Image (cartoon, helix red, strand yellow):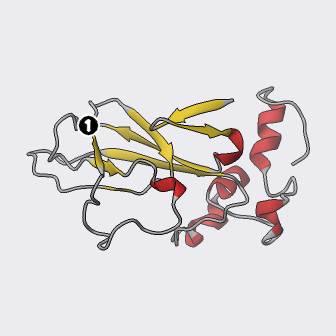
Amino acid sequence: MQSTCLKHQITDEEQAAFERDGYFTDTTETGRGNLHVLPGSHLQDEFPGQDRKAIIDGGVPVSVPSGTAVIFDRRLWHSGSHNYWCESRRVLFYGYSSRWLRPRDDMTVGHYLDGCAPIRQQLLGVTHSGGRGYTSPTAEDVPLRTWLEQHGAISGSPA
């Protein structure tokens, strides 16, 4: 299976990490805190500019109406921009990656974990078998898989 992302064909093997942004605010005009992306930058190893806080030359504003989902390869250089509009930009950001990619954010959720059910702990990045839980998870590391199997959403397979 292949999908198109900014005119670049991405194979399943390359889709290790992607982001889905759900827009609740109209950004069809620039100056509304638009997301900017640099097409092709996911194929480079180095940062393509000088200032990480500036809009990079060649960056393209993503101008979409409210209710739009924008999906892109997380390796693509992207940033927000200034919002000069009278409304706050409201966007829900979801980042997905293969389990073998460790979480990169310093989440401050440790104080919630004892009160969380196993599936919620998994979704918050908990692994019970240490670093191997990301690359070779045990059933204890992935309780969501068991739940999905029990509810007929997936067929049984190795963790």
Confirm whether residue 75 shows in the render.
no
Q: Is residue 27 positioned above or below 135 on the image?
A: above
In this rendering, position of residue 98 left or right of residue 154: left
The residue under the point 14% across, 45% down is 87
Confirm whether residue 147 shows in the render.
yes
Q: Quadrant of residue 86?
A: top left
> Residue type at mark 1?
Ser
Along the line of sight, which residue is nearer the eye, 39 or 133?
A: 39
How far across and down, in percent of the image, does residue 159 sit? 86, 49
The residue under the point 84% across, 57% down is 140
The residue to which callout 1 is attached is: 63
Along the line of sight, which residue is nearer the eye, 3 or 117?
A: 3
Along the line of sight, which residue is nearer the eye, 118 or 75?
A: 75
Q: Is residue 106 positioned above or below 91 on the image?
A: below
Q: Quadrant of residue 128?
A: bottom right
Q: Is residue 24 positioned above or below 118 on the image?
A: above
User: What SS does tag 1 mark?
Assistant: loop
How far across and down, in percent of the image, does residue 57 sit? 27, 58
